[in-house]
Amino acid sequence: MDAAVDTAKDATGPLLEVSGLAKHYRLHGDIYSKLAGQKTQYLKAVDGIDFAIRRGETLGLVGESGCGKSTTARLITRLVEPTAGEVRLKGEKVLGFSEARMKRMRSEVQLVFQDPYSSLNPRKTIMHILGRPMQLHGIASSYAERRERVLELLARVGLGLEHIDRYPHEFSGGQRQRIAIARALAVNPELVIGDEPVSALDVSIQAQILNLFRDLQEEFGLTYLFIAHDLSVIRHISDRVAVMYVGKIVEIGPADTVFANPLHPYTQALLKAVPEADPDKPPPELTLKGEVTSPVDPPPGCRLCGRCPLESKVCSESAPPLRDTGDGRQVACHNI
């Protein structure tokens, strides 16, 4: 692979900007509900989020299952078309890209999925899986050149020559994820989005893959959007953290600051819910009561209404915007 460009984290302008991004899925009722005059319902998977990622940094996106993290990844890469909002890559509007520009964008932004077994074609060898993206993007013209680059990629992720002609089912879960990472690197991307890339792995293998991500970032100057629900994973790999709850981002800030002094009640609840590895200590006390707000036509106010210890009248009337708290982070709460 080409030598990495040493990109400073404070380079002018963010690599990726997301503003007002939303995805609403229309729910089709049955014929009886339509005859009864019931209004159309919408599942608001992502509902107007804003964040930016600087070159060379890792933004961790954390939240419980179903909050819209994976949908956000698919919206950024246009695997799913957004209902509203804007995505800018290096200042360019992604939603306005032509077909030719979208092809180039596919080489600039790559996804690593949660389950490598389902994202790798079981009928193809590793040579084909890693070599085909190079061929499509014109990175290596001849088979010999592609094979050489594939071998180099395998070496980068801790695999060898003996693996190049095998099929995905012949590898362990950790090895398959290494192959998925190598495939992402095959087209020399600038931004890599990891969609729960270690959640399906054993804890010891998770540590190896996380360290691999960090080594590759340092070597190739990569920028990461790292999605996970495991706070320990996010804390280990992230420079900044964005906390998501029912389609909304409720807190963004430097990882050390957020973990040391969380401001939003939901962030506080997430951290308090992490059990300690001590059998003599009681299980963590849940600070939020009740059920998670449904993303289907949610109320107009804060999504944490009915569960939040800081709740006031204004919380049920309007959704709090993300506002700067003056310490390098933003929080969406009327009462902070």
Image (tube, helix red, strand yellow):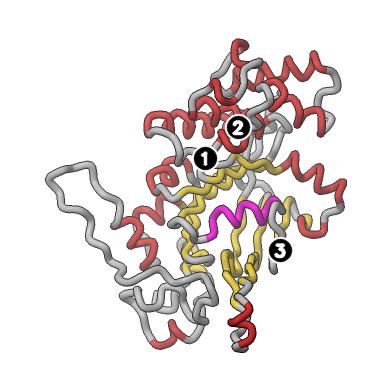
Mark 2–mark 3 Cα distance, whole angstroms, equals: 28 Å
Tell me the kind of residue under disc 1.
Pro
Identity of the amino acid at label 2? Ala
**Label placed on residue 298:** none
2 or 1: tag closer to the N-terminus: 2
Q: Nearer the viewer, mark 2 or mark 3?
A: 2
* Quadrant holding the C terminus: bottom left
Q: Which of the 4 image quadrants contains residue 105?
A: top right
Callout 2: SS: helix
- Crowding at dot 3, Cα within 10 Å, few <14 / some 14-19 / many 20+, comes out as many
Residue tagged 3: 86
Please tell me whether residue 174 is drawn above or below residue 55 in the rendered image: above
State the residue in front, 5 or 138: 138
Q: Please tell me the numbered disc located at residue 180.
A: 2
Q: For the residues carrying marks 3 and 1, which lies nearer the camera in this image?
A: 1
Which quadrant of the view contains residue 162?
A: top right
Q: Are marks 2 and 1 in contact (CB under 8 Å)?
A: yes
Question: Mark 3 falls on what kind of element?
Answer: strand
Q: Which residues are magenta?
A: 68-77
Q: Residue at x 72, y 60 (%)?
A: 81
Q: Is residue 328 visible?
A: no
Answer with mark 2 or mark 3, whichever residue precedes in sequence: 3
The tag on residue 197 is 1
Residue 314 screen position, x and y as percent: 44, 86
As drawn, 114 above or below 138: below
